[in-house]
Image (spheres, rainbow, N blue to C red):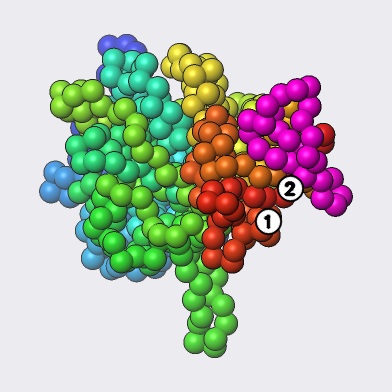
Amino acid sequence: MRRIQTSSRGTPKTYSSIKEALINGKGFLYDCYYLSKEGVKVENRVIAKQPIWIDQELCDLETGLIKVEVKFCRRERYHSITLPYEEIMNHSPKKLMAMGLPILPKYWSDLQDYLARQIEESSLGIISKTIGWQRVGEKWHYLLQSERQLYCIENPLFHLKQKGSYEAWYADYCQYIRGNLDLELLVLFGLCPVVIGYTPVAEQLDLEPFVLHLYGDSSSGKTTTLMLLISMYSSPTITEPKGLFRSHSSTINALTKLGNLQGVLVGLDDSAASQNLDYTNFIYRIANSVDKFRLNSASELQETDTFKVVIFSTGEAPLGKGNQSGSFVRLLQLTDLTLTQSVTHSQAIKRMASTNYGFLAKKLAQHLQQMDISQIVERIQFYSQYLLEEVPIENSKVQRIILRFSVVLFIGEILNELDFNISIDQITLKLTELLKREALKLDILMVAYPLIRGYIESMQTQFKINGYLRNGHQVVLGKIDKMENKYYRVRMTEQQFKTMLTSLNLPSERSILKEMKKRGLLVGCEKDRLYLRSNGGKYASFRIKLDL
């Protein structure tokens, strides 16, 4: 059994690791074997002239292979290597000696017995390529960095770090972020992947990854904001090898090599650096959570790595071209936000992000782990129903955006349980306005049609209906004539039509008339015109279902 050797002066000091204890002159007994900073002894024989020990046993989740983490000292420097279990039990120590392990060949069998006894006592951890959510047995773990005795991350593309303390990061948050509604909103969006990547919740709600693009003038605080959001997960430095903060100046294939990130935010700064990229394709691949499909030598589809991430992008202009509603539902573009108040404020946030990082995302995940899955789902659905009542649009794409915004509100509620004091009411108002704007992008007529119908029905006394006026009103707004199946033809002057749209907070009349024309709702207009021309005037002439 392992026990620490102490002096006779009483209770020993607790050390965080075997290495720390050895450096401080302490030793360990493993049955008859004694480990100290001078090496390993058994029955007064030195079987290793430098300290060597098994730190933990690891199981590779993908291969099932058992590995052991061996730590040793060589020339006063401590090292760590991970080896397959079989190599410890190998008859020849030459391969291990070539790696630098302090082995005396004639005592190899003794050293094997010593290491085997340690393996029996060591804790079992896991090795995985996955960063973020990982299922181990019946439990889900959220790991951003390797954690001793639990989880060893061996991801070939990403290596995340932690620095400082959560308490220091939170104190700076309270000083520099709290009360700035736009920054608070982006913090909530930045934490969305923690919920989206949590498979038990995501599968029940059909949550999807997405791309959020923040654009605007240079020096408006976009990069500073991106650093803040990445700091919730890891180092926010763009020069960090294998970090989450990256540049757009890469190929599409490089940008989508996100395999084995499950519930992590990835930042891409300065979209102008990659103007020729096919962003529609990129957005679809992020939303579909899979790397590029490839064929093997037998022309069979290879297994690809999957991921669940949110991409946070910055640039001076909107991302991509065109208005495909399929990509719009997967892409949220924000601009005209108040991010930083001054150069001093921006520098303070950058200092905050680069001094303490790697805590908040994990803290949120730990909070989720303590909740029942059904409770999480119900709370998100509550916000979803509320937003649907605020923007009652029966459209599957709009409802997908509503679900995403519901996750944002749910995260805000959780952060308030962690004393962030976010105004959920103000965030809800901002998201509602944003939702209306996004709905217009997806289907402008879908939003405008019921508003126009409601306006005409409420103002019907100011229209001439089937040639007659009601209640002696003067003709102010236009004419309405009955057609078939509850359809009516409405005719308004160009100015009357514009005035109506302005009162309804709808965009330009041309965009709405174009959609009406596409759907065959314009009446009497020439093929290449949006307005009916009659007696020297221009009229919006369209058919619409009314309840008069």
In the rendered structure, find residue 370 and report the number of the disc placed on it.
none
Is residue 131 in view from this perspective?
no
In terms of depth relative to the viewer, which is nearer, 381 or 376? 381
Vertical side of 543 occupied by 525: above or below:
below
The kind of secondary structure element at disc 1 is loop
At a point 55% along the width and 70% down the height, the residue shown is 303
Q: Is residue 483 magenta?
A: yes
How far is disc 2 from disc 1 in space, using C-alphas?
Answer: 7 Å
Identify the amino acid type marked 2. Answer: Arg
In terms of depth relative to the viewer, which is nearer, 47 or 128? 128
At a point 36% along the width and 38% down the height, the residue shown is 335
On the image, numbered disc 1 is attached to which residue?
523
On the image, numbered disc 2 is attached to which residue?
489
Q: Quadrant of residue 42?
A: top left
Give the magenta part as a residue range.
462-486
Q: Is residue 384 magenta?
A: no
At a point 59% along the width and 53% down the height, the residue shown is 534
Q: Residue 92: where, in percent of width, then height? A: 34, 68
Q: Residue 146: where, in percent of width, then height? A: 39, 43
The kind of secondary structure element at disc 2 is strand
| Tag 2–tag 1 contact (CB < 8 Å) | yes
In terms of depth relative to the viewer, which is nearer, 263 or 118? 263
2 or 1: tag closer to the N-terminus: 2
Vertical side of 336 occupied by 52: above or below:
below
Q: Residue 517: where, in percent of width, then height? A: 61, 58
Is residue 102 in view from this perspective?
yes
Which SS does the magenta portion mostly show? loop
Identify the amino acid type marked 1. Answer: Val
Quarter of the image where the C terminus is located:
top right
Answer left or right for 193 relative to 73.
Answer: right
